[in-house]
Amino acid sequence: MAMEKADLIIRNAMLIDGTGAPGTPGDLAVTGSRICAIGPSLDCGAAQEIDAGGKALAPGFIDAHTHDDRAVLVDPAMTCKVSQGVTTVVTGNCGVSIAPLTIAARPPGPLDLICPNPSDFFSGFAAYFSALEKTPPAVNVVAQVGHATLRAGVMDSFDRAATMDEVGQMKDLLRQALKDGAAGLSTGLYYAPARAAPTEEIEALAQVVHEEGGFHSTHMRDEADGVADSLEETFRIGRTARVPVIISHHKCVGLANHGRSGETLRLIDAARATQKIGLDIYPYVASSTILHKDRVALSSRTLITWSEKADGLEGRDLEEVAAEMGLTPDAAIDAISPAGAIYFLMDERDVKAIMAHPATMIGSDGLPHDRHPHPRLWGTFPR
């Protein structure tokens, strides 16, 4: 019996269902916002028909690691993502989220990478989600609560552990955010706002995540010489708080650590035998974040992406800029900071090994507000 007329039929597609099964040739029909039929040769008409000509037809991709918290508001078309087939973005990564925070001065780095102005932040996730509903973006948003954002809201200095009272305040803010719809807690223990936070501080917050049914993702404390110790810290937090953990943009940073992916993946596999662990990666040997002297020291080359103090440096080599200024690279960093950079830190073989791991997800980690962003912002999924 023939089907009723659909709104859209895509014919002659290679259907990829997202389960890992091989693609199968066939047609797909849509009525309203729902897939209403899939088959080798659908016997129905439609208001619109598209001949895929054998091209792949797949569910929208999930960008597992983004900093699109504000981008989904200021550019709801999200062309940088939908042009790659991405239909869901996970935000609030690396300890940095757009809520919950009320702040009077310019936020500390790396919070300023997503929200350079105090007015960009939201006091809570209810207000943030309400803003998204008023101007719905073209992508779904899975939002995390950033640990650095929590710290910025309750602490007067970052070079110490939070007090019991401050941890209590952060737990209350986190719990409310999760009840309002946030999906989990992220940390960025490499960055200054959270570097002094002891493991116990994260465990206390992660316990709230367990109670509310969320997950924990982390930009680990060290992705270079101390990568193995940082992995163990991550596993411990997951075990103690009984939460699933995601290792953000997993990599082995610096020439001395190239080739260590075999070691780190073995550690991850051993831990996965007893707890839930995932990881994400972007398919490039270069990373991007704020301009840091320790990152420059590990990098074979550093490109400037933006500077608050100097115009026209976007895309330029740090060593060349330093030479023109008559300064050492370290002195040039002091002169142009706050700034951002692209760092060539990883080995292609490690990137490929991590990408091939069954627990690995793809996350662009792009910075949508950079004036000269890393190509991963637009190119991760095609690559």
Image (cartoon, rainbow, N blue to C red):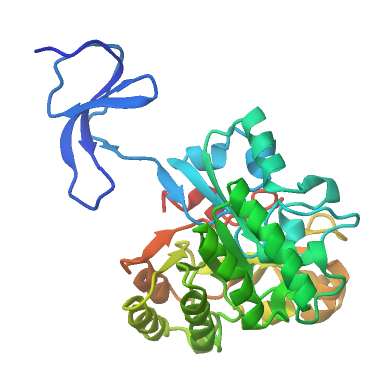
Q: Is residue 165 left or right of residue 4?
A: right
Q: Is residue 216 left or right of residue 106?
A: left
Is any part of residue 341 visible from this angle? no
| Total numbered labels placed on residues in the image | 0
Residue 102 in the image: above or below residue 291: above
Vertical relation: 14 (above or below) 242 = above
Q: Is 239 on the left or on the right of 158, as rendered?
A: left
Q: Is residue 224 above or below residue 91?
A: below
User: Which image quadrant is residue 72 in?
Assistant: top right
Residue positioned 56% across, 83% down in the render: 224
Q: Quadrant of the C terminus?
A: bottom left
Residue that extends furthest to the right in the rendered view of this protein: 104
Q: Position of residue 107 (x, y in %)?
A: 82, 59
Quarter occupied by residue 326: bottom right
Q: Nearer the viewer, residue 348 or 198?
A: 198
- Which of 375 and 17 lies nearest the eye of the viewer? 17
- When the figure is inspected, residue 214 is found, relative to residue 168, above or below; the finding is above
The residue under the point 60% across, 53% down is 178
Position of residue 214 measured from the top left corner of the image (x, y, whole percent): 51, 59
Which residue shows up at 39% across the image and 24% down it?
33
Where residue 216 appears, as percent x and y from the top left, is 53, 65
- In the rendering, at what x and y percent does residue 222 appear? 59, 81
Viewer can see residue 42:
yes
Task: Locate residue 193 relative to residue 203 in the image: left or right.
Answer: right
Taking the spot 45% from the left edge, 43% from the top edge, the residue there is 86
Quarter the N terminus occupies: top left
Depth check: give the residue in front, 47 or 297: 47
